[in-house]
Amino acid sequence: MLEKIKKSASFVKSKVTIEPEVGIILGTGLGGLVHSIEQQQILEYQDIPNFPLSTVEGHSGRLIFGVLGGKKVVAMQGRFHFYEGYDMGQVTFPVRVMKFLNIKCLFVSNASGGMNKAFSVGDLMIINDHINCLPNPLIGKNIAELGPRFPDMSEPYNKKMIALCEGVAGKLGIKVQKGCYVGTTGPTFETPKEYGYFQRIGGDAVGMSTVPEVIVARHMGIPVFAMSIITDLGGDDIAMNVSHEEVQKVGAMAEKKMTQIMTGMLQELNFAAL
C-alpha cells in the first residue's frame, strides 16, 4: 500500500503547483464550498493512479487545489464509503495521499441524522468524539512509516480547533452544536430503534462516513476538525421519512454557514499552535 500511496502523491505533485497546507473532505451535498476556493487547480479522481471513483450522487470526484481563508488547501469534492463496496484501505486512501502531500491538518464535513433532542434540522454540529460501528481501517499489517500499531485516540478531534471554531462561529453569529458522531456502514438510513440505541450509547448524530478517515488521519499524526450538518432527525418517538435527495437539499442550504465558519477558521489558524 505504501508504494501506491507514494505513487499517487508523486503524480499529484507533478500536476499541480500548489503545495497544500490543509486537507478538506466534503460530504454529501456539501461540495459547493469549493466555489469559495481561489486560484483553483483541479484533478479528476479518474486521472490519479490508484484512486477510487465516487459512485454516490452529490459526490463529484475531484481534487480541488487552491487558496481558502489565506491558506493553501486541497479539497476532496466527493469521498468514498464502505457501503459502495470499497474496502477500508480504499475509503481512507486519499487521506494517506494527503499526508504525503504534507498537509498540516484535516477538515472533514458530513451530512448526518440528529438524535439529540436539542438539535434541529439544519443545525451545524462540531464533532468532539465518535463511536465507530464500521470495520477499523487499521486492521491488518501496520506500516510503521505511516504510524504506530496502537495509535492513541484520546483526542480524535483537535480541542484547539474546536475552540477556534466556537470563537469564529460566535463572531459570525452562527449557532453551533457539539456532539458525538456515530459512524455506521449504511447504506440504509436508521430505524427508529437504531436511532434510539445510538442515542443511548452516547451518540448525538449518526452517519455513514468520517470515522475511518479520522482514524487514519490520527494514525498519521494529523490534527482533525470535523463538522456535521444535521439533515434529519430520528429516534424512538420521532417518525421522519429520510431520503438521499432531502439530505442533499438540507446540506446545500446549510452549506453557506459551514463555508463561512471554515473560511474564518482558516484565516485565524496557527499551525504551530495545534
Image: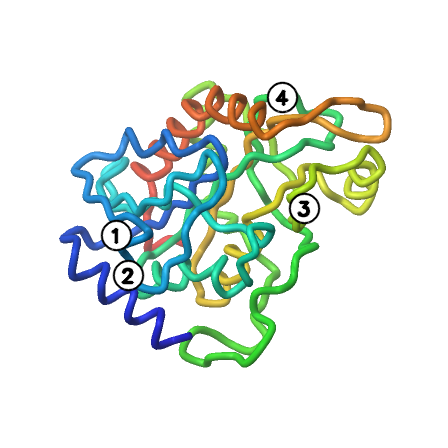
Q: CA distance from mark 4 to mark 3?
A: 17 Å
Please state the horizontal and vertical placement of residue 138, each as a whole percent of the image: 57, 70
Residue for point 54% across, 81% down = 141
- Residue 124 figure quarter: top right
Please state the horizontal and vertical placement of residue 178, each as a whole percent of the image: 61, 36
Q: Secondary structure at mark 4?
A: loop
Residue for point 50% across, 43% down = 226
Q: Is residue 48 above or below residue 179?
A: below
Q: CA distance from mark 3 to mark 2?
A: 29 Å
Residue for point 54% across, 50% down = 81
As drawn, the label of residue 101 is 2
Please state the horizontal and vertical placement of residue 85, each as a whole percent of the image: 57, 56
Does label 3 or label 2 sit earlier along the sequence?
Answer: 2
**Which residue position holds label 1?**
20
Q: Nearer the viewer, residue 216 or 128?
A: 216
Q: Is residue 108 above or below residue 4?
A: above
**Residue type beneath disc 4:** Val
- Residue 26 figure quarter: top left
**Residue type beneath disc 3:** Val
**Residue type beneath disc 2:** Leu
As drawn, the label of residue 182 is 3
Does label 1 or label 3 sit earlier along the sequence?
Answer: 1
Please state the horizontal and vertical placement of residue 11, each as a whole percent of the image: 22, 63
Dot 3 crowding, Cα within 10 Å, few <14, some 14–19, many 20+: many
Left or right of residue 187, residue 168 in this image: left
Dot 4 crowding, Cα within 10 Å, few <14, some 14–19, many 20+: some
Q: Is residue 93 above or below residue 75?
A: below
**Which residue position holds label 4?**
121
Residue for point 52% across, 38% down = 110
Does label 1 or label 2 sit earlier along the sequence?
Answer: 1
**Residue type beneath disc 1:** Pro
